[in-house]
Amino acid sequence: MRMQTMCLVLMLFFSILIGRAADGQIVTATLNGVVSDSAGAAIPNAQVQILNVNTGMKMIAETNGSGLYSIAQLPSGSYALTVTRAGFRKSVQTGIVLTIGQIATLNIVLQVGDVKETVTVTADAELINVTTADLSAVVNQAAVEELPLNGRDPSSLVLLNHHQ
């Protein structure tokens, strides 16, 4: 009887542990940043819109009094970021690629002008991570398929990220 009780307690413990681990899985990304003018002054109440170019999903945020914005729960994918504020030219940043678990920072500088004027940046956005010391990379299917079959060692996936 004591053995059955011990097994039941252990099964309960491991089921709670596994449940907790599943809750901790991160499947989205976060984009943060500061919107400022060309002199470096923060721009409060600017509208920040992010568009997933693959799915059409839009999310809108507004900068706070310090010009900060944060958009969380973004599925991995390619994005375009549009920032508008009265008295400034609209800024459109394309080429933003977010990956699972990424916390990226993209600061935007607005230029004084009419909101009908648009400044478009089409190069890949230079995203930085200023919140954690984590290093990560996405390994695509082609890289996995080109792995040598010598031993079929999955730890060799680590060697694919030679950019760090």
Image: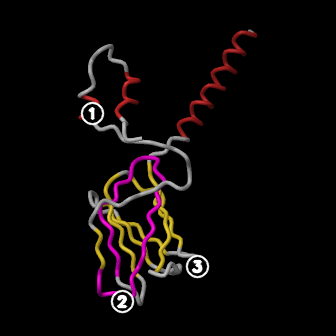
Q: Earlier in the sequence, mark 3 or mark 1?
A: 3
The residue type indicated by label 2 comes to Gly
In the image, residue 65 above or below residue 146? below
Residue at image point 51% right, 69% down: 69
Specify how the rendered protein is coloured: secondary structure
Residue at image point 60% right, 28% down: 15
The stretch in magenta equals 90-118
From the image, state whether disc 3 or disc 1 is nearer to you. 1
Asked if residue 80 lies in the magenta stretch, the reply is no
In the image, residue 43 above or below residue 132? below
* Residue bearing the label numbered 3: 65
Residue at image point 37% right, 36% down: 161
The residue type indicated by label 3 comes to Gly
Q: Secondary structure at mark 2?
A: loop
Q: Earlier in the sequence, mark 3 or mark 2?
A: 3
Q: Secondary structure at mark 1?
A: helix
Q: Secondary structure at mark 3?
A: loop
* Residue bearing the label numbered 1: 143
Q: Position of residue 129 (x, y in %)?
A: 49, 54
* Residue bearing the label numbered 2: 113
Q: Position of residue 164 (x, y in %)?
A: 42, 41
Please name whichever residue, 122 or 17, is drawn nearer the observer in this view of the structure. 122
Q: Position of residue 108 (x, y in %)?
A: 42, 72
